[in-house]
Image: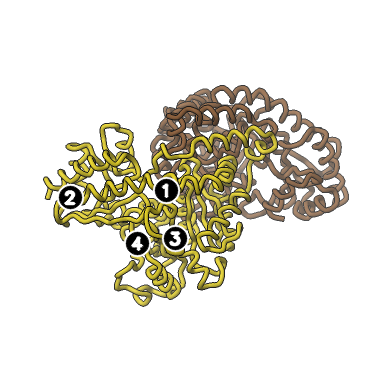
Chain colours: A yellow, B brown
């Protein structure tokens, strides 16, 4: 079963799917979006601008607002530190294009975000593991000279997809020490940052690196952000924030790749974001939190001994580790066929497709009662297989 | 003066710019677009779908309508022969990604579309010239084996940007003979196809190749189309049509690059295109035709002997050849400084930046009287320099 077959299951009303990892469309600010399109297109001058080509860097108002928002997160960005992209996925593609050639080494967590692997794979790198908390490898264990010196490290420090893991401030500082020691860029992918259900966020890697280097422009972090989880993924608007020089180089990549992000969609986001981001944050957090709580509760209630799972402070994902002899791919086929319940087998998130006995569950869709029912079903299949 | 400086001139009301090559926003079907956004976002079920993630291949209704439209152009496409992209520029990037590695050979016209060079440049190919009408080189003049065998030929057969040239049916057949002889794909980039101001279009290369191979799936042509010139470039919607197997491979590239084109924008185009494409075609053709006529008339009236130009049957561009001793870059600086008139120097359109004594004029923006005034000014600068 491949990813598109998994996604097709989402459309089957008889299947409980924990595979998707997409936001709940019932929570989108549809009316605010409708009004924004309508008001921009009703005013002839604004409409003529909104329907015409614009610049690869992005809409000036939107860049300025994002810079302001990044300052609220502790990173002193100006508009020229921000590039608007067609979703954070496009930033991953551009980073691959800028940094990677065939055989170059990219460092990622293991497991890591599937979309990052898909984006980087096009540039045919070799993968190695970015040291994670508890890792015994350090700067000295990596080649410091070309051609084997790593080109960058990629990490999702907040509610990682797929593990749900968050790095605390000390772990972030140690990751920066590592990148400083090796003198490589760090890619900080943070699409879920605003979806925190408990506790408080440590400063972004971008902010910590800027502090060390006395400025975002001197720092080594490229931050990726997204409106997809809070407002809508269908407008395809995300951003990248980092040193102005990198942003300028990536704007040329942007122009060559697809000229610019949709002008009208950028203007809609620029119009709704300042008011709607705080409102949406308050609105969606308790709803997703209740779904997370339902999933964790159901796992505790139903799963047999020998199965463990992460307890994420935010985001959409719980990472489940099965007894080693169980293969999550086999389990998926059985779960779909016998109890009509789906998830993503863990192998998809490893560059070498290892991780056979792990799986990813998303709690973003579905009421708590449905989640509980689905976890109960999965637990039956695990128990039968164990 | 680089391209972004040239584009900045477009915004200066005191400068007459023939540099842009963008459609006139006064001609966009703004009200139809506004109504489409409004009606989709007013209906809760449609809105939830339009604001959610969808598939990398594109909206099913839009793919089906484009396939129908391609059949009207003589190419028997089905929906699975169509991939929706963020403007035809993105298709160029994907073609570079699929076919080109460092040092590979890409064949293009000389001059050729600047955006194609920008897209392909990222994959570091070598360029050679695709045989054009009157060329003395044939199949035997190109290596037939790797690593020097060309990966594809790229051509804009209809109202080429920058030359305005159209290939007739015989020339298209000879181009296909060449591609057959070398057994390479042909990329047919046709964003202006609908903007024909006189005569009739020969069949698309896609249609001719499908006829030879008894089917689009067996043919060697990948066709690129665009809604940017007729409806709006700001929704960033174009398409690629070709063998279903290539479309399926490029859908994976699409997913890794930026997942999918904006769902809502695709649904808006799917809703307006069937009604608005024929209406817009009738509306904009006479307006752009009058601008072309004004430019050609003014060139005949004002330009000194020794200057020649193309007479395009459609599109946005006239290609002007100056006496060989004149450098269009020097002329541009003089024209902007002394008579506040701009164009794009020809060198931008050659892989090797030759073509110093040619320049590209766009007639897409501005009333005939302004065009006449601008050409008069340019002619003065040419006369002074000659």
Nearer mark to the viewer, of 4 and 3:
3
**Dot 3 corresponds to which residue?**
A188
Is disc 4 on the same chain as disc 1? no
**Dot 1 corresponds to which residue?**
B256
Which sits earlier in the primary sequence, circle 4 or circle 3?
4
Find the distance from the CA under tag 1 to the CA under tag 2. Answer: 35 Å
Mark 1 and mark 4 residues within 8 Å of each other at the beta carbon: no
Q: Quadrant of residue B286?
A: top right
Please give the chain letter of the residue carrying mark 2.
A
Residue that appears at 47% across and 61% down: A99
Which sits earlier in the primary sequence, circle 2 or circle 3?
3
Please give the chain letter of the residue carrying mark 4.
A
Q: In this view of the protein, can residue B129 be seen by the observer?
A: yes
Residue that appears at 66% across and 54% down: B353
Nearer mark to the viewer, of 1 and 2:
2
Find the distance from the CA under tag 4 to the CA under tag 3. Answer: 12 Å
Q: Secondary structure at mark 1?
A: helix
Q: In this view of the protein, can residue B84 be seen by the observer?
A: no
Is disc 2 on the same chain as disc 4? yes
Vertical relation: A264 (above or below) A274: above
**Dot 4 corresponds to which residue?**
A109
**Dot 2 corresponds to which residue?**
A303
Nearer mark to the viewer, of 1 and 4:
4
Return the x and y of residue B96 as percentages of the image width and height. Answer: 49, 48
Is disc 3 on the same chain as disc 2? yes
Nearer mark to the viewer, of 3 and 1:
3
Residue that appears at 17% across and 57% down: A324
Q: Nearer the viewer, residue B222 or A83?
A: A83
């Amino acid at each position: 079963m491949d990813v598109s077959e998994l996604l097709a299951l989402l459309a089957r009303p008889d299947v409980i799917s924990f595979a998707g990892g997409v936001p709940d469309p019932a929570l989108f600010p549809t009316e605010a979006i409708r009004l924004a399109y309508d008001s921009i297109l009703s005013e002839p001058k604004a409409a003529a601008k909104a329907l015409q080509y614009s610049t690869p860097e992005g809409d000036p108002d939107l860049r300025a607002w994002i810079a302001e928002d990044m300052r609220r997160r502790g990173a002193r960005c100006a508009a020229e530190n921000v590039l608007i992209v067609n979703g954070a996925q496009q930033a991953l593609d551009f980073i691959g294009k800028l940094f990677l050639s065939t055989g170059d080494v990219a460092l990622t967590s293991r497991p890591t975000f599937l979309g990052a692997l898909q984006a980087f794979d096009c540039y045919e790198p070799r993968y190695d593991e970015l040291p994670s908390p508890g890792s015994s490898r350090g700067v000295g264990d990596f080649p410091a000279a070309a051609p084997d010196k790593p080109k960058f490290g990629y990490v999702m420090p907040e509610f990682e997809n797929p593990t749900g893991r968050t790095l605390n401030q000390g772990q972030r500082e140690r990751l920066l020490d590592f990148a400083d020691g090796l003198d490589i860029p760090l890619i900080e992918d943070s699409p879920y940052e605003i979806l925190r259900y408990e506790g408080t966020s440590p400063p972004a890697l971008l902010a910590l690196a800027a502090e060390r280097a006395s400025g975002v422009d001197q720092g080594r972090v490229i931050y990726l952000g997204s409106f997809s989880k809070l407002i809508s993924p269908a407008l395809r608007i995300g951003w990248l924030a980092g040193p102005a020089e990198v942003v300028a180089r990536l704007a040329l990549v942007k122009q060559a790749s697809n000229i610019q992000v949709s002008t009208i969609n950028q203007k809609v986001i620029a119009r709704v974001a300042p008011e709607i981001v705080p409102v949406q944050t308050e609105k969606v957090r308790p709803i997703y939190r209740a779904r997370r709580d339902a999933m964790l509760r159901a796992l505790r209630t139903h799963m047999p001994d020998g199965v463990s799972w992460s307890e994420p402070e935010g985001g959409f994902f719980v990472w489940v580790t099965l007894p080693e002899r169980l293969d999550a791919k086999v389990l998926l086929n059985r779960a779909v066929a016998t109890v009509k319940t789906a998830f993503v087998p863990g192998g998809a998130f490893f560059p070498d497709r290892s991780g056979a006995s792990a799986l990813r569950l998303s709690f973003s869709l579905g009421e708590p009662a449905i989640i509980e029912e689905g976890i109960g079903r999965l637990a039956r299949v695990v128990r039968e297989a164990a």
